[in-house]
Image (tube, grey):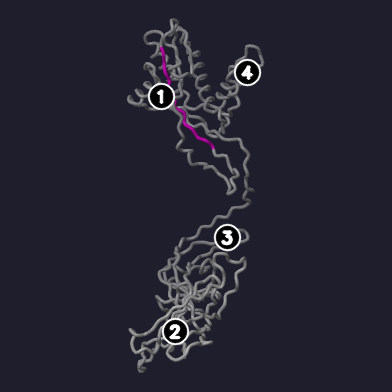
């Protein structure tokens, strides 16, 4: 790669190329003395009395190279340390302008200049080294002028890609804008592009160790898709859709292309391996891990692949994520310390055994609905929030363990029998339903209940 002197070095090499070519063609007999320069047009003296023929190479624009632009993006690690020095790739746009001392001299100069650039489509590395050679120790030897000797360190000949010189098309409108911007009278000119100059920083970088061995695996891509999540009470029960999963039940995932050699069901990022008999292309059945709290969860099917030396299991393709609910279940309930007499309201402590266990940060609410009312319109209902076990604004560093037994204080409740439900993070426990058609209470809720005498 070149240094920041690469732009000036390209101009110096092209100027030297033109100068040597004009000398070799011996144009002095046709146009007299010829000067080759690399100046802006407004700095060229064309009004002097001793005007000579002049061939001027002017760099009027520098643009990013489209091919190299995204080759190496700036690379830094998460701490901001430099990992690589991506090159700055530039295209240089030149105007080759001819100034003639006499009639037709400009045309002659421009013709020879364009021929030289046409016959040199690529700047050879040896030519670059000769043009940018340091001063010769021999008196009278060739070399760069004193003020341009720093260009020798540009390292232009060592960059990865060679520099191509090709003509460019510039329309009449753009030419008019350019010369108007120069604030100079128009002169015969031709446009060229030099591509590409690669400028690279010399700052130190942090590089990783080389890869000792590469393994290539080609496998057919089967993207698993979950279409439905169902709850199954037991192996012999029919899966049910649209209902939460209870503690101890199983998840049934229905979809497409779910089967693979190594299938893992990811529940909230925790992998669960189903039994081989529970995996088919359209269905995967898996038990919910013990200790999974009530609330909203996500599930995915992951096809793992054995890769590496020695082979190790890696995450392969993943299905879409599907939500499902785990509902709490009231396994036991009782009322204690009941206060109140006659027709007055009652206060008490309701002792509940809830599974799965309730975490210290989960929101818990108890809903009570009168069970023995003559109609739904007259049935009384109450809700009570369980006081939080910790200060949610300033939680302790070590949270208390989840608990199954909770005590909910209630007050202002009319004596009677009540259906109770507990809500954990917005998911309510189910109520039992009478399923006997012969019963007068068929299809009515029957429990769990608690009585406040």
Q: x, y percentage for residue 329?
A: 49, 81
Going by the image, does 204 lie left or right of 262?
right
Q: x, y percentage for residue 65?
A: 46, 35
Q: Quadrant of residue 105?
A: top left
Q: Tell me which residue sits at (42%, 80%) in the image.
A: 382
For mark 3, give the secondary structure: strand
First in sequence: mark 3 vs mark 1:
1
Q: Which mark is residue 413?
A: 2
Q: x, y percentage for residue 79?
A: 60, 48
Q: Which mark is residue 191?
A: 1
Work out whether 341 lies above or below 221.
below
Which one is closest to the eye, mark 4 or mark 3?
4
Q: CA distance from mark 3 to mark 2?
A: 64 Å
Pointer 2 local density, CA inside 10 Å: few below 14, some 14–19, many at least 20: some
Q: Main secondary structure of the magenta part?
A: strand
Q: Nearer the viewer, residue 270 or 338?
A: 338
Going by the image, does 141 lie left or right of 387?
right
Q: Which mark is residue 307?
A: 3
Q: Which residue position holds label 4?
A: 135
Which one is closest to the eye, mark 4 or mark 2?
2
For mark 4, give the secondary structure: loop
């Amino acid at each position: 790669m070149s240094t920041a002197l690469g732009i000036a070095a390209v101009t110096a090499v092209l100027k030297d190329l033109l100068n040597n070519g004009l000398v070799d063609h011996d144009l002095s007999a046709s146009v007299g003395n010829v000067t080759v320069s690399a100046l802006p047009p407004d700095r060229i003296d064309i009004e002097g009395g001793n005007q000579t023929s002049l061939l001027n190479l002017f760099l009027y624009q520098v643009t990013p190279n489209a091919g190299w632009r995204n080759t190496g993006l700036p690379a830094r690690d998460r701490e901001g340390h430099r990992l690589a020095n991506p090159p700055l790739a530039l295209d240089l746009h030149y105007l080759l302008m001819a100034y003639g001392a006499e009639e037709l001299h400009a045309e002659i100069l421009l013709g020879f200049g364009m021929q030289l650039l046409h016959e040199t489509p690529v700047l050879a590395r040896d030519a670059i080294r000769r043009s940018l050679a340091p001063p010769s120790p021999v008196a009278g030897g060739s070399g760069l002028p004193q003020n341009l000797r720093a260009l020798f360190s540009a390292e232009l000949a060592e960059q990865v890609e060679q520099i191509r010189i090709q003509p460019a098309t510039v329309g009449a409108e753009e030419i008019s804008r350019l010369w108007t911007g120069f604030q100079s009278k128009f002169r015969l000119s031709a446009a060229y592009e030099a591509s590409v100059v690669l400028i690279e920083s010399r700052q130190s970088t942090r590089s990783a160790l080389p890869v000792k061995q590469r393994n290539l695996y080609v496998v057919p891509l089967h993207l698993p898709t979950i279409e439905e999540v169902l709850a199954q009470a037991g192996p012999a029960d029919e899966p049910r859709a649209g209902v939460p999963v209870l503690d101890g039940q199983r998840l049934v995932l229905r979809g497409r292309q779910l089967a693979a050699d190594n299938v893992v069901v990811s529940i909230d990022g925790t992998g669960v391996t189903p039994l081989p008999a529970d995996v088919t292309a359209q269905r995967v059945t898996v038990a919910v891990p013990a200790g999974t709290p009530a609330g909203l969860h996500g599930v995915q099917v992951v096809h793992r692949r054995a890769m590496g030396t020695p082979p190790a299991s890696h995450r392969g393709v993943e299905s879409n994520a599907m939500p499902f609910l785990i509902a709490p279940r009231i396994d036991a309930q009782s009322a204690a310390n009941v206060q109140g007499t006659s027709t007055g309201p009652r206060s008490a402590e309701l002792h509940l055994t809830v599974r799965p266990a309730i975490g210290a940060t989960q929101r818990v609410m108890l809903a009570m609905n009168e069970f023995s009312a003559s109609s739904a319109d007259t049935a009384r209902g109450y809700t009570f929030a369980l006081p939080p076990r910790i200060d949610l604004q300033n939680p302790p560093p070590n949270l208390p363990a989840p608990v199954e037994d909770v005590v909910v204080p209630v007050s202002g409740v009319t004596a009677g029998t009540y259906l109770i439900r507990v809500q954990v993070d917005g998911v309510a426990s189910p109520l039992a339903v009478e399923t006997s058609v012969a019963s007068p209470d068929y299809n009515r809720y029957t429990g769990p209940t608690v009585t406040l005498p």
